[in-house]
Amino acid sequence: MRILVVEDDSILADGLVRSLQQAGYAVDWAETGIKANSALAQESYSLVVLDIGLPGMDGFEVLRRLRQRRKYVPVLILTARDSVEDRVRGLDLGADDYLVKPFALPELKARVRAVLRRGQASIKPQINYGPLTLDLNARRAWLEGKPLDLTLREWGVLEYMLMNSGKVLNKAEIIEALCDWGEELTPNAVEVYVSRLRDKIECAGIKIRTLRGFGYLLEEPADEKK
Amino acid sequence: MKKNSLQYLLLSSLLLPLLALLVIGVIGDYFTALRPAVAAYDENLLSTALALANNAKIVDGRITLDLPPAADQVLRTDKYDRIFYSVHGPNQELLAGNKELRLPTVEMGPNKPIYYDANVAGEAVRVAAMRVSKEDTDLIVQVAETTIKRKRLIGQILITMLVPEILFAAAAIALVWFGIKRGLAPLDRLRAEIASRAQNDLRPVAMENAPLEVKPLVQDINNLIGRLGNLLNTQKRFFSNAAHQLRTPLAGLQVQVELAVAQAASPELKHTFKQIRMATVRMTHLVNQLLTLARADPGDRPVDSLRPTDLCDIAGRAASEFEAQAFAKNIDLGFELGPAQVFGEPLLLYELLSNLIDNSIRYTPNGGYVTVRCGTVEDQAFLIVSDSGSGIPTAEREHVFERFRRVEGTPGEGCGLGLAIVKEIANSHGASVEIATPSTGRGTEVIVRFKRLPAALNHDLPENSHSRGTGSCG
């Protein structure tokens, strides 16, 4: 998997490039928006880690041009600005995630994995998550190679959680993600599905953490954290 | 009244000349009134002198003054004054009357009376003198009287003139005083308007109500305010840029240190790198806190930066942010969120909440709990963060909001700005902060109570498209 790091600060860029390389990715570095723009026009990347405050063409503009080309590449924005407006602008322009500087490396890696997973799912409809494999077209799941018996609702919750692993998901978001499944869901129903999912997957070491009164977070499988 | 006050200046430059004019007027009037009065008395004296001359006779070439004793008595008696007379012959010899009444020093033409002041027996007198011809003999007849009557007259004239003049002066002073007061009233209103402004209100002063003469001043003040606003904005931008610029090198430092920690060959080196990493994290925290504190300063924010915000959405963001930190300490992070509309700045409200949660997680031992609650009671939104930590002693509770204040004997690496930031942001939102003990009797509970939302806003809340945690109140 090939990642483009767009960052003008050479020390941070060096750190990002090396740590992503150590995590097993092929990494290119562009130090200006113009270089990033031409690299994105010519090459094909699995992910762009994009700084906003760039000299000349800024990150927002790089993102806007990337989205104009209608070739989907997931984008993780890095920025020193933490205002709500900047956050919204990035997401409105089609960024997949947003990280405010400075950040912890494990946090960045987790976000990169989650964004990549979502990006992969749009190309190849299969998610591998440690011992868990999901076939998105067939809506079937395997755990440690054995078929996993899931109801449609359980499958929906699991798919949504996998797409957003490492992130806290509140019950309302889960309900919203499942709303095109017909009837209304209640928070209590979500609790029931999560509890059943736990029974089925925690034996293989995939943990769902609870934030009391708020929602859930799917822990990443141990072998993905490098 | 201050020397450089406009009122003082106007009063002194108007009143002093006015008073001087009054004095000159009084003096002028006095002399114009005095002259005819004095002339009347002088004429009187002259008639007496003429009567005297008529009584002079020349008998055998000698001049005699035939004055019966009764006439002499009448002549010498006056209600107020004593009267003297003298008649001198052509050789300046005293023919009759008082010898102390000497001849005038000036040359006198025939039948032309003169009047002059003199002294008789040590008394000031007024004299009427005339040269008359009696059968070819020149006589000089003089009549003098003391000045008591005249002085009384002067006194009377002065009183009748001065009383109205003084009243007139008093009225003039009063009119000038009130006129100045009235004239300066628009300035007073201008001052009051500027004085009553909020600290961060840099709108131009309204020109419409200012008097014509003051308009240029107001215009200049507005120009000054404008320049000041620009300067403030420049400084704000500079500060914000500086803090933001710090973030990129800090991010570089953090990433490099983490790489070093992962790759360090010896345990000693690993330890060193871990210490550097810790220092980097603290420095980052401090930079963020300072940036927040600067942002929370009400003088540093535009007046219109507040918008209707639901605390639920704020809490939703905090949930994602602090899950890992709580998980690492095996702390049960819980939420009890009800609808809580406030009028505020989302970023600052988030900083308020995240500082409270950060504190709670920091000072709660492993295995404890931290609970975030929000909701609305009697139209007032509240936000509560409670924990099962060591708690804050009652005596310390009023001090913990001071900047760089840390409760003695507490572990952790806080910079002591957290609660100061909470207080500052709460203040800038008109909210109160109270520290209590949770109902379990252990730990800390921080309660933030917000102002009642203006009714107009309560009914017309826009969909908050900026929040990603919509519906977290569910």
Image (cartoon, coloured by chain):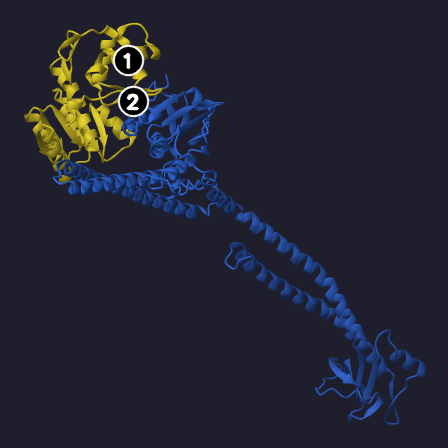
Q: State the SS at label 1.
A: helix
Looking at the image, residue B260 sits to the left or right of residue B128; the answer is: left
Q: Residues within 10 Å of mark 2 (few under 14, many from 20)?
A: some
Q: Residue B357's spot in the image, x, y percent? A: 35, 31
Residue for point 47% across, 44% down: B195
Residue B310 showing in the rendered view = no
Identify the image quadrant of residue B36: bottom right
Q: Residues within 10 Å of mark 1 (few under 14, many from 20)?
A: some
| Chain seen in blue | B
- In the rendered image, is residue B334 in sight? yes
Q: Which mark is residue B468?
A: 2
Q: Is residue A85 or residue B349 the one in the foreground?
A: B349
* Numbered circles on residues, count: 2
Look at label 1 and name its amino acid. Answer: Val
* Quadrant in the rendering for residue B129: bottom right
Mark 2 chain: B
Circle 2: element type: loop
Q: Where does residue B180 sit, x and y in percent of width and height?
A: 56, 51
Q: Residue at x 15, y 29 (%)?
A: A49
How far is mark 1 from mark 2, CA to CA?
22 Å
Name the colour assigned to chain A in the rendering: yellow
Instruction: Please say if B294 is above or below A21.
Output: below
Residue closer to the observer: B206 or B453: B453
Residue at (22%, 20%) from the top-left corner? A164
Chain letter behind tag 1:
A
**Disc 2 residue type (three-letter):** Arg
Q: Is residue A70 above or below residue B296?
A: above
